[in-house]
Image (cartoon, rainbow, N blue to C red):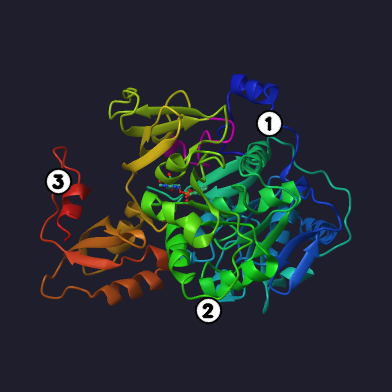
Amino acid sequence: MDGLTPWPADLEARYKAEGYWSDRLLGGVLRGDPGRLALVAGGDRLTYAGLDARAARAAAGFARLGIGRGDRVVVQLPNTTGFIVTFLALVRIGAAPVLALPAHRESEIRYLCELSEARAYVCADRDGDFDYRAMARTLPVDHVIVEGDAEEFTPLASIDADPVDAPGPVPSDVGVFLLSGGTTGLPKLIPRTHRDYVYNLEASAEVCGFTRDTVYLVVLPAAHNFALACPGILGVFAAGGTVVLAPSGSPDEAFPLIERERATVCAVVPPIALLWLDAVNWSDEDLSSLELLQVGGAKFAAERAAEVPDVLGCQVQQVFGMAEGLLNYTRLDDLRDLVERTQGRPLSPADEIRIVDEDGKKVVPGEVGELLTRGPYTLRGYYRAPEHNARSFTPDGFYRTGDLVRRLPSGHLVVEGREKDQINRGGDKISAEELENHLLAHPAVHDAAVVGVPDPMMGERTCAFLIIRDAEKPPALADIKEFLRTRGVAAYKFPDRLETADAFPRTPVGKISKKALAARLG
Ligand code: OOB
């Protein structure tokens, strides 16, 4: 595959010799006893043997379409059996799923298909009012495969054939492409190799104490790294436990599933944790099976983390991770103070951490600086993005996270802020530049600058500052949202708030000062 940046030979040798990289493949992740329950989704209840058989038949079905090792397939499915089976099938034949979120729309999906030169696009029929099939009609792919009512396309259920022996991937192949939160005009793809992602999920499962008795409730999109592999769905499968899929984190949907399936673990973003802390007061469901609530994706306040054990009756774990690789977890046996006040410490002894100032020099221990990292499951380059890579990595291969952190003597990190031009809206990442480019296309807009506004529930919300061509006729927020909708932008990227400006404040080098703009907001 072109457009990839491999690990250098010395590190590859080290990661193998020290046992971080094995020959295990993502397709071999179903390690539970054949008769045990692997997956509960909607009305489906599949044992390990049953899920394995479904994945094997789907793998043969994809192979029959001519899809195989080295191909890319854009997958955009909600939390369904179809997602799990499709993922397992593709990784078995060595075709890499490009994992889009159900919320993505034409602007994101077309770009992903083009960038990855995807052979196929797998989607649901609808998401509320939105029809994925209508969008699919214009996409540059050979095959459109639909879960549900396929209309003229190939039904996902028909991707089914008698398994045959076919050559599969090797551990150094890309297993899956994850989406970056993005800081530039266009989203980036993160290649995760079989061996690095297998290590990611196995080491995570160990740190989080996952066993065959783990019952893991999925409320975040299954396509997100946190829910998929930290330890996530794949970590549960490797440990032999049970995955229960929920459509969302809404207490109405999640709480009855926790009670019915006796769920023991769940991974959430802070807004869901806050909702749950409140909702237990008026819900009747029995949540006593819950042992661990993982919270990550955005900063979870120490005060709220402290409430979790008393209010929800389970342990809390903070997770500071990124699709690019590095994962930090508070440990199950960490002192309470560390669990509440830090975002955890690196998963792997081989994770290298550097905290640097604006000149790239290491800060004094305990001081705040930008987090740089390198390790056995952190990417060395985005897919087909040489110019961006030159900026996002140091010459010796450290990934510049754009996160501002402080390190405690114990090695735990505290996230203190962010340097990257991104809004973290309750765990959903929005590239300011990407949104600004869409806004600049609006006929009434002369210039645009997007900043985050602190919000008690979401952490941040999105505010767009606009310089309007005709100050007499400023567009309303609703007009802007409708404009973005017609451009096919995912709704979570829509601004929550609009402000007009005559001019933007500038930094000494002439860049728009987002700090000064944010300071204008009351
Ligand atoms: C997770 O992954 P992404 O790729 O959606 O976002 C990564 C970014 C980080 O660079 C950081 O800016 C922010 O999200 N972040 C946090 C955080 N966890 C992620 N900021 C503060 N506190 C935290 N606990 O968000 C992700 C991937 C795997 C596991 C968990 C989260």
- The kind of residue on which mark 2 rests is Gly
Dot 2 lies on which element?
Answer: loop
Dot 1 lies on which element?
Answer: loop
Q: CA distance from mark 3 to mark 2?
A: 42 Å
Q: Which residues are magenta?
A: 375-390
Residue at 48% over, 39% down: 335
**Residue wearing tag 2:** 128
Q: Residue furthest front?
A: 310
- The image quarter in which residue 257 lies: bottom right
**Residue wearing tag 1:** 21
Mark 3 Cα-neighbour bin, 10 Å: few <14, some 14–19, many ≥20: some
Mark 3 in CB contact with mark 2 (< 8 angstroms): no
**Residue wearing tag 3:** 506
- The kind of residue on which mark 3 rests is Arg
- The kind of residue on which mark 1 rests is Trp
Quarter that holds the C terminus = bottom left
Tag shown at residue 223 = none
Front one among 399 and 418 = 418
Q: Image check: 379 left or right of 89?
A: left
